[in-house]
Image: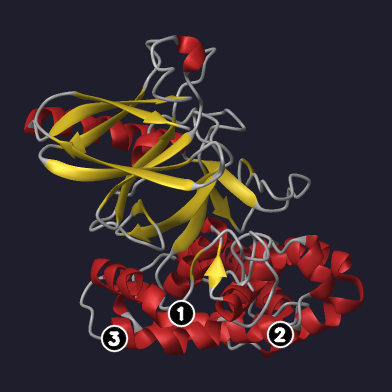
Amino acid sequence: MFLYATVFRYFYLDISIDLIMRHLLLVICIALCSCSQYPGVSPAYHSLLDEAFSKAGENAENLKKVLSDAPAEQKDGVAFLIAYMPERDLKSLSADILSENVEYAYKARNQFAWAQAIPDSIFFNEVLPYACLNETRETWRKDFFERFSPYVQNCQTIFEAIDSVNRNIRDELLVDYNTKRKRPDQSPSESISQGMASCSGLSILLTDALRAVGIPSRVAGTPNWHDNRGNHNWSEVWAEGQWYFTEYYPDKQLNRAWFFADAGKATKGDRQHAIYAASFKPAETSFPLVWNRKINYVHAYDVTDRYTSLYKEYMNEVEKQDRHVSVKLMMYKSPKQSSHSDDRVAANVDVFRGKDQMGGGRTAGPTQDMNDVLEFFLEKNHTYTFKYTDASRKPRSEEVKITDKTAVIKLYME
């Protein structure tokens, strides 16, 4: 009995020592982590930060200061931006731009209910970033937070907030689409100072305005439409687990715009004709910047499938409602030459109903099959205006009343 008790005592002592050692190791590990180079930052970012700071060179100290000075709840957000920052920004982004951007992004998150409900993964990548594409880096967020917060302060849902920003942004910023803008990839201040921007510049303005009030947003677009008539960019918004598209001059509802039919004909995986959505963190590909194709640091996802699926669903609904009619459009050199395929001209045509653009496309040229005709599906019993540029580069328009019958319209370059 004595021997059994002795053995049990030593055995129990061994277990106790083992437990004590484990607890000591755990305490040491916690202490080491708290004294690490990046206190308060999730370990997942540590190696990424090491790599980023090594690339930053002389600017590393500025970035490190923003990280160390950030409040505890903002440290992972700062770490995310530095970890995935393009090398150009690692070497040059000022501490002021980064710190103000993060401060006001979290201010919006704390102020608006929809922003509080956003998962960190979406908040970090689609609200927090200080830039959309390759535009000039600047301190836009404080200004936009103060401009657009009043428009959304009484909104009850994220959809109401999206609509409010969308409807008021043009009158707030006084910027309009104009091909005379200085650059396609303008920053917010550059567009505001000129009062004009390209579709890309307008998309940057809208995306930044939405982000400023805690609404996830990103720039989307295509380098070339299916009929090769050029590129277009717009904005996407994330709400209740889904992505929707909109643009600076909004339609009455999300996932509707003049370019919907064209987007519905995009080709997934085709570098020229797919649809892309920009991402701050690394993604499956890069965003095609048509003004500088050498830039590959703007990450992107190929989101073509979502647009083609949405358009297919829309067309199925259109057929069921029987409210639209096919309108086929052909462009010829002159009224005297309008019977042979050789007389056809490839030209861009935009369709309007009142001030609202309903669509656009490119007419078939002389080398295309005669059955290859530009086609629109337009609502019956309305008057539409078809606008284009003639052979002398003068703007022309043709007003047509569409009835409930299929229409064939001929336009002329001369």
The residue type indicated by label 1 comes to Leu
How packed mark 2 is, by other alpha carbons closer than 10 Å (few <14, some 14-19, many 20 or more), is many
Residue at mark 1 = 173
Q: Position of residue 60 (x, y in %)?
A: 84, 76
Q: Which residue is mark 2?
A: 66
At x 59%, y 47%, the residue is 300
Gap in Å between the C-alphas at discs 2 and 3? 29 Å
Tag 2's secondary structure? Answer: helix
Q: Quadrant of residue 96?
A: bottom right
Calculate the distance from the C-alpha at mark 1 to the C-alpha at mark 3.
19 Å
Q: Which residue is mark 3?
A: 153
* Amino acid residing under circle 3: Gln
| In this rendering, the label closer to the viewer, 1 or 2 | 1
Quadrant of the image occupied by residue 128: bottom right
Q: Is residue 259 left or right of residue 135?
A: left
Q: Residue 106 at what x, y percent from top left?
A: 49, 82
Q: Earlier in the sequence, mark 2 or mark 3?
A: 2
Find numbered disc 1 in the image and state the secondary structure of the residue it sits on: helix
Front residue (pair 41, 326): 326
Mark 1 vs mark 2: which is more N-terminal? 2
Q: CA distance from mark 1 to mark 2?
A: 30 Å
